[in-house]
Image: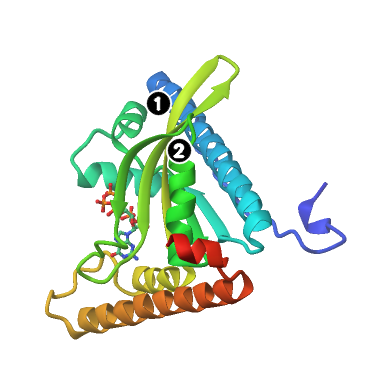
Amino acid sequence: MNINMNPNGELVQSAVNAPGVIEIPESFIAEAKQFRELMMMYTCAIRETKTKLEVLNDELAVRNQRNPIQMIKSRVKKPSSITEKLQRRNLPVNVQSIKDNLDDVAGIRVICSFVDDIYTVANMLARQDDVDVLVVKDYIRSPKKNGYRSYHMIIQVPIHFSNGKAKMRVEVQLRTLAMDFWASLDHQMKYKKNLDEADEIIEEMTACAEMIAAADLRMQRIREKIDERENPPSPFQRDRD
Ligand code: 0O2
């Protein structure tokens, strides 16, 4: 058919010069397959960890009549970010190097209602007997200099595949909605941009982080007061305290 005769008139004929047969080295094909497989494994690790978190949320929601987790976001690190991180650390860029050196290819962000929910959920996850906690960074108790707050855990979870079990690492970041608001704007505006240490923007952002942290604690205290009114401690309890 003459493409110009297309009755819909939507197709426009254009010349496409297909390149000759492209030689792809065997080693590259093998590596590409391994890369795809590894990304699939990280995706499964995210799914497994998310399920654990959802189960905890469901249980706590029934017990306490409210959701400790407001939202769960997840992502597998983009190939370009993986390459950039390995290169920045002068590490080889290959599949083995990703497995050996990167902890955050599988990333989950858990947005909690209140600060104490973060510790409740994190401790419950850490106590599970198939979860190994490799690293904890508590940027809530010890915020970063710029005011960044979040609770980071690198965990390892076993995933059962057809040919056996693999222990996969997942980075879990837990924060409140308020901390997430600050971090997302910080990420958009200036994280990873080399601003002068004395820059007033840094000072402004740090001041905002402090205000947000104060508001988080105030909200938690309000919730505690409401909890107390709804479930006052029994007189016996008070005597014992
Ligand atoms: P992205 O683009 O979010 O993935 P490492 O992650 O191992 O290289 P580091 O920096 O010691 O080393 O890890 P850390 O402190 O646990 O931080 C890891 C992640 O926390 C970052 O991932 C960010 O997601 C987040 N983070 C840390 N500091 C800040 C901050 O000041 N502002 C914001 N908005 N986010 C922060 P990536 O891979 O650096 O970035």
Q: Is residue 204 above or below residue 130?
A: below
Label drawn at residue 28: 1
The one nearer the camera, 171 or 214, is 214
Residue 223: image location, x then y, percent: 53, 74
- Residue pictured at 63% horizontal, 45% vertical: 55
SS for callout 1:
helix
Q: Quadrant of ligand 1?
A: bottom left
Q: Is residue 4 left or right of residue 18?
A: right
The one nearer the camera, 62 or 136, is 62
Q: Is residue 88 left or right of residue 62?
A: left
Residue that mark 2 sits on: 127
Q: Is residue 191 above or below residue 136?
A: below
Q: Quadrant of residue 139?
A: bottom left
Residue 17: image location, x then y, percent: 54, 44
Q: CA distance from mark 1 to mark 2?
A: 41 Å
The one nearer the camera, 180 or 38, is 180
Q: Earlier in the sequence, mark 1 or mark 2?
A: 1
Q: Residues within 10 Å of mark 1 (few under 14, many from 20)?
A: few
- Residue pictured at 61% horizontal, 54% vertical: 60
Q: Residues within 10 Å of mark 2 (few under 14, many from 20)?
A: few
Ligand 1 within 8 Å, label 2 CB: no
Quadrant occupied by the C terminus: bottom left
Residue 142: image location, x then y, percent: 24, 62
* Circles 1 and 2: CB atoms closer than 8 Å: no
Residue at the extreme top:
163
